[in-house]
Image (spheres, rainbow, N blue to C red):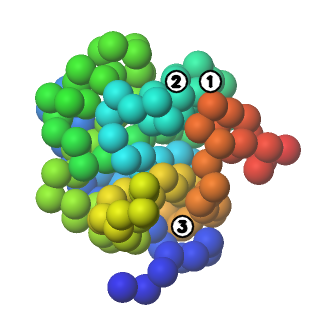
Amino acid sequence: MMKLKEGMSAPWFEGVDQEGRTVRLSDFAGRKLVLYFYPKDNTSGCTAEACSLRDSHEEFLNKGFAVVGVSADSEKSHKGFADKYSLPFPLVADTSRKIVNDYGVYQEKKMYGKSFLGIVRTTFIIDEKGKIEKIISKVDTKNHSEQIFKLYQ
């Protein structure tokens, strides 16, 4: 698969969120989308990242951004995670790993000397016309909102 780059069209996606609603890339036409991929619900880094985005959600909306998270966890897992931390944005359950593969974030990772396949934490900022405007591959989980806002100062 070709590696995605800024300026390319964002791969089309469709999935179901924690509330059972279908979420599509086309739902966000006309506004910017923060599409963030994270490894697993209820882990320390993923919780810090989600809470950073939650705490700035109003500011994102005021600046014309929507926020959507994606991981391979189930709708039920996402529902528990979103409820526990009062997350106000959709978390798409990509249990088939189609979206994470289309975005190139399902890759070989290493931890404790062992290799395995998993989601590499990555955020794509998609513009109003569906083009990838920014790619953040080194995500600062605790300060992710500020990291995104700094790109638009």
Q: Which residue is identified by label 2? A: 51
Cα separation, mark 2 vs mark 1, equals: 9 Å
Which residue lies at the image location 42% right of the left edge and 56% below the top edge? 111
Mark in the foreground, 3 or 2: 2
Ranked by sequence position, the earlier of labels 2 and 1 is: 2
Residue sitting nearer the eye, 74 or 24: 74
Q: Which residue is identified by label 1? A: 56
Q: Would residue 128 be seen by someone viewing this image from the given angle?
A: no
Ranked by sequence position, the earlier of labels 3 and 2 is: 2
Crowding near the residue tagged with mark 2, few <14, some 14–19, many ≥20 C-alpha atoms within 10 Å? many
Relative image position of residue 4 (x, y in whole percent): 50, 76
Which residue lies at the image location 59% right of the left edge and 19% below the top edge? 55
Image: 18 above or below 117: above
Residue type at mark 3: give it. Answer: Lys
Q: How many marks?
A: 3
Q: Mark 1 and mark 2 in contact (Cβ < 8 Å)?
A: no
Mark in the foreground, 2 or 1: 2
